[in-house]
Structures are given as C-alpha cells and as structure tokens.
Amino acid sequence: MLSIKNLKAEIGGKKILKGLSLEVAAGEVHAIMGPNGSGKSSFANVLAGHGGYEMTGGSINYLGKDLTEFNVEERAAEGLFLAFQYPMEIPGVSNIAMLKTAVNSIRKYRNEDELTAGAFLKVIKKKAALVEMKQELLKRSVNEGFSGGEKKRNEILQMAVLEPTLSVLDETDSGLDIDALKIVAHGVNTLRSPDRSMIVITHYQRLLDYIQPDYVHVLADGQIVKTGNKNLALELEERGYGWLEKQVVNG
Amino acid sequence: MTALHNFLIAQKQANEAAPEWLSSLQQVAFSQLKNRGLPSAQDEEWRLTRLTELYKQEFRPAIATNTLSLQKTLLTPSAGSRIVFVNGVLDTGLSDSSFVAGLAIEPLEQAVISDKLNLETFFNASPPLEQHGFLSANTAFSKSGYVIRISADSIIDNPIEIIFIANNTGPAAWHCRNIIVADQFSKATIIERHVANDTAETYLSNCVTELHLADGSHLDFYKYQDESLDAYHIGGVYSKQSRDSYLATNNIAIGSKIARTDIYATLSAEGAHCEMNGLSVLAGDQHVENCTEVIHAKPNCTSDEYYKSVLDDQARSVFRGRIIVAKDAQKTDANQQNKNLLLSSRAEADTKPQLEIYADDVKCAHGATVGQLEEKSVFYLRSRGVSETMARALLTFAFANDVIRRFHLADLQKQLSAQLADRILGEAASAIETDSLFGEPL
Ligand SMILES: Nc1ncnc2c1ncn2[C@@H]1O[C@H](COP(=O)(O)OP(=O)(O)O)[C@@H](O)[C@H]1O
Ligand SMILES: [Mg+2]
C-alpha cells in the first residue's frame, strides 16, 4: 500500500528526514516511536503534503501512484488521513459543517453524488456514537473550547467519517486518560480491515496494548533505526531511546 | 470652505414649529458648524478617513425618485414594528407599527411637538460636549428620525426595525436623529438597517442615534449598514447607561464607499455592562472607520468590545478604541479586541487602541491583530479533503462569522450568517448550511 524509499525532507533549510524507508502492506498497523524532535510529526506532515517541507530525495509510492503528484486535498481524497498531534481550532465554523464540507469535497473528487442531509446525518450519528461524542460538540465550532481529550476524539471522529485507506495518527494518545484512550482505540480498531492500513505515532507503549501493531519502528534523527514487533515497544518503555541513538552513532 | 460646508450652511434651518429648547440647541449647533467647519485631514481624529471627494460634491436637497418596495431589503422575520425612512424622510406607507403595550414610537418631528416623551431631557444628552462638524450638522438640521421609548418594566418581545433607504438622484444629504429611551427594567431589541435602492446616486447619510438606558434596563441594538458603493455614511451611536443596565451595540458595516461611525458608551452608574460588537467586510476601495469610546465613569462596570474586519482588494479599515477609566471607577473590567484579516497585499488596516486608566484596581485587557489566514488552519482543512480555495473561503467566513455568532437575536444572526456565507463562499455556501441536519435530535 505504502512504499517509502530513502525519503529526505527539510524545512526552512533544516534537514529533518534523512533517508527514511518504510513499507506498509494493506491491513497492517505500524507503530512509530522515537524521541522528541526526531521527525515523527514532520514525517506525518510530509505524507499529508504540507507545503512547508521540501522533499529533497527519495520516493513515496501509495497504491501504485507517486503520492507527491497529489496536493494536500487530493491526498485526502485518495484515502490518506492525518490525525493531528495538535488539532487546529476554527472558531466560527461548526464541527458538523466542516465534516459535511469535507465529505462532499471528497465525494466530488471521486465522482460520487453529494450526500443528502439525511444520509449525512445517519453517518454522523453512527460515528459520533462510536467515539462517544455529544451532539453539542458537533454543533460547536471546530475544536474551539474542546478539552485535549475532546480534540483527539474529534480527530478520530473525522477519521471514522472519512473512512481513509491509510491513516496516520500523530500522538493521538498523548494527554488522554485511560477512558479516553479506550474510546480512541475502539474508534481506531473499528476501522481496521484487511484493506486499510495505519501508522500510529506514539510515545507510549500503553496505546499499543489497545491497538495491536504488526510492526514497531524507532525513528531517530530522521531515520528508522530499528524495526521489531510489539515487544520492541516494551523494551523501549524500559530502556528509553539512548541505546538506539548510540548504536546509530557507532554503527 | 468646501462645497459641502457651503451647501450645509446655506440650508434652511429646522422647522419653525420646533419648541424653544430645540431651536436654541440647533442655533448653537449651527454656529458651531459655521465657525468650525467639517473635520479636515489636519484633525488627528479624522486624518485616516479622507473626505476630500465627499467635500467636493455639489449637494442638492434630496428628492425621492421612483416608488419603492421593501422586497429587496433584508428584513428581520421576528420584527414587530417597522419604521421606514426614504432619503431621511419618514415614509408612512412603508412603515408598519401597530400598538404594542409598553412601547411608544414617534417620528422625531411629531415627538418634539407632542412632547409626550419629554424629549428635552434626552435630546443631545449622550453625545460628547466637544462635537465634530458632522455631529453639529446633525443637531442643527435633524428634522426627522425616530423616537422610541420603552416604558418601565415592559418587555418588548418582537424586535423593532427601523429602515433607512436611500433612493436619490443627484448628490443629496440627510441628517436623521434618533432617540431611544429604555426606562427602568425594560427590555427591547432595536435594529437599524441602512440600505440603498439600486438606482441611488451619491449621498451622505449623517445619522445619529442616542441610547438612554435607565436602571436595570436591557437593550440589544443593531446597526446594519449595507448601502451602495457611492454612499457616504457618517454615523454616531451615543449611549448613556444607568445602574445595572445592559447594552449591546452591534455594528455591521459592509456596504458604502466610506463609512465612519462613532460608537460612544458612557457607563455612568455602578453595575452597568456594555458589549460592543463590530464587523466590516470590505472589498474594492471601500473604507470604514469605527471610532469607539467606552467611558467607565463609575465602579463595578464591565465592557466587552469585539471588532473585526475582513479586507480584500485595496479596502481599508480604521479602528480606534478608546477606553477611559475614571479615577473612582474601581473594579472596572474592560476588554477590547480588534482583529483584522487582510486578504490582499493592497488592503490596509489601522488599529489604534487607546487606554486612559486613572483608577488603580481595574482589569483592562486589549489586543489588536492585523494578519492573514493561518496557514496551519488552511492545511488542516485541506488535509480533510477541502480544496484550498474552499478552505480559505471557509476560514474567512469563520473569521467574520465569529462576530455574528455573538449576536443575541437568533433569526437576525442566522440571516446575517447566511448573507455572509453567500458573499464569501458564493455557490459553496450551501455546503455549510447545516441547520437542516439538526431537524431531528441525534
Ligand atoms: N516549521 C519548522 N521550522 C523549523 N524547524 C522545524 C519546524 N517544524 C519542526 N521543526 C524541527 O524539526 C525537527 C523534528 O520535529 P518534529 O517532526 O515535530 O519531531 P517529533 O514529532 O518527532 O517530536 C525538530 O528539530 C523541530 O524543531
Ligand atoms: Mg510530534
């Protein structure tokens, strides 16, 4: 589904991704862990097509297409979704209006008819229940005055509504209490299927108890320095990242 | 001497039927105007609004042209009484005000004579003593306007709507003076709409509204100004508030060549609260200046000011926000925010907060920004599949709608949001129409 080879990217002249390679097959869940500032969010942003980053090398192939040929909104319409580490607040546009605009924009791109209000309502109703979001939060402005946990749940709601083929979750678990974490994980797991893949960026092994990954990667200084199964996450929890960074320097 | 000034002082002064108190007031205002003239670019308070072109116009007294209907005008669905002025003159045919208990509405020319409302006490009592030329002209020449009094303890359920329509040929000027008196513990909503017929030519609407709020009264006031690109609008909304009164002035300016509005609020007794909301959405070479002043004269009053502008092309907005906290106005809580969104590199916003605080135990917050759309937000929306054009339009709409959603009158709020969506989002406006989605509970 996703094949990244030797990806290099910089922002404002600063090199951030320094030859990142990653293969994600359909149906797989990949966890990416790594120290702060190692480039995890940058990687997610580059995938989503953020204009601030300049790709200086490598390739990103998604479903047989060169992903870099698509702009941000086209990538979304092609089935890519990024759950933001820090979701934006948009005072003055209701959550539901934004969702409706997003759904219909994507449907238009795919040459599908726009959803009627009734059909859209049905979808929203189901998905809001999935992440236990109250109607009141749907009517409120996007993320405005939402608690940290509500913002993250809102990201998962958007994901559930847009039903992406490839989801990238950037520290969706950070700042969540255990109940909110379970809700988020439930939302994510409901979406798991043999033809959907996920990249889950996290700091904490705890999330991976709820969202079982097929692979765990460590991103350090713009490169994947180690890949393992979920036991690697446990090991990282115990030992930290220091030993890996040293390996890179030495090796 | 400018052409406009000459034209004004050559005007016959107000009607002979005016009572003594009014004639002498108007006499004084007339000589002020004659001696001091209209504001010039040398006046610090006026230098950012160039009126040279206005001053050059050869004005004539207004004559109404074709007959009008209100069909094309936005009306507030919930409005009860409606008063309509065409070129500054009362149009009884278009007006519609039936009897409402606790509510007295009279045209100014009648009110000064009948004097049921004790106008002498209120007329010209809320504007500042030091008046500029346009305010003097308004006092000197105001023959028409509306007077509304809401009697004590009356709650007027339906909003009262006043519509000023321009429908002139040849450059014309008019000066309406409106007076609203909210007696103790009364509650009302009043909407002023300033609009123009398609065929209206250049005009100057010099319109002043005075708001007098007695103890415990509650007034929700709207000034909606969407005239023509040939319109000059010079206006003032001057309020005085007594103990525990509540006032919201909501000022929407989206259509004129030049609009300058002075919104002055005096909190003259404890416990008064004043809210000021303002929105300008401008394009082309439109220019709006809002000059606000809040005087905290007594302790324990609160004021909350929120002004925004959206500027495209070479449009320009000027915001002046003066807050004065008098020496004994302890425990004042004043907030002022002015935010300007520039959609073009040629657009310009000036923002001039000015705080004069003489008390020591006060909370005064203020902030002013001039900037573009946040690229992070654009990216966020695009990452959800929304096109870049739509994302920008949506964020622009959101920026402006942020002011409208502070309004208290639900149907007006909805109408203005829809109008704004139309203007900013065009055909895509329907995309955000989500009302129908909430027809049934989720
Ligand atoms: N807009 C930016 N301009 C310059 N440097 C940036 C910008 N955004 C991120 N960086 C830098 O890129 C590096 C990686 O950041 P980030 O991708 O956020 O890391 P992580 O998500 O792993 O904590 C950091 O050194 C950070 O300071
Ligand atoms: Mg990060």
Image: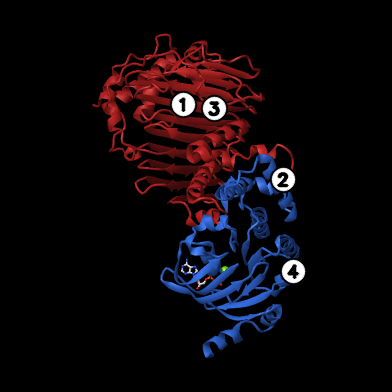
Chain colours: A blue, B red
Q: Does the rendering let one see residue B119?
A: no
Q: Between marks 3 and 4, how big is the CA–CA gap?
A: 56 Å
**Of marks 1 and 4, the one in the foreground:** 4
Same subunit, labels 4 and 2: the answer reads yes
**Of marks 4 and 2, the one in the foreground:** 2
**Number of numbered discs:** 4
Q: Between marks 3 and 2, how big is the CA–CA gap?
A: 39 Å
Marks 3,1: beta carbons within 8 A: no
Q: Amino acid at mark 1?
A: His
Q: Does the rendering let one see residue B23?
A: yes
**Of marks 2 and 1, the one in the foreground:** 2
Q: In the figure, residue B124 lies in which quadrant?
A: top left
| Subunit under mark 3 | B
**Residue occupied by mark 1:** B194
**Residue occupied by mark 2:** A122
**Residue occupied by mark 3:** B191
The structure residue drawn at horizontal position 52% and vertical position 51%, both measured from the top left corner, is B360
Disc 4: CA contacts within 10 A as few (<14), some (14-19) or many (>=20): some
Residue A38 place in picture, x, y as percent: 54, 75
Residue B407 place in picture, x, y as percent: 58, 37
Same subunit, labels 1 and 4: the answer reads no
Q: Amino acid at mark 3?
A: Ile
Q: For the view shown, which residue lies furthest in the top direction? A: B17
| Subunit under mark 4 | A
Same subunit, labels 2 and 1: the answer reads no
Choose between B252 and B335: the one closer to the eye. B252
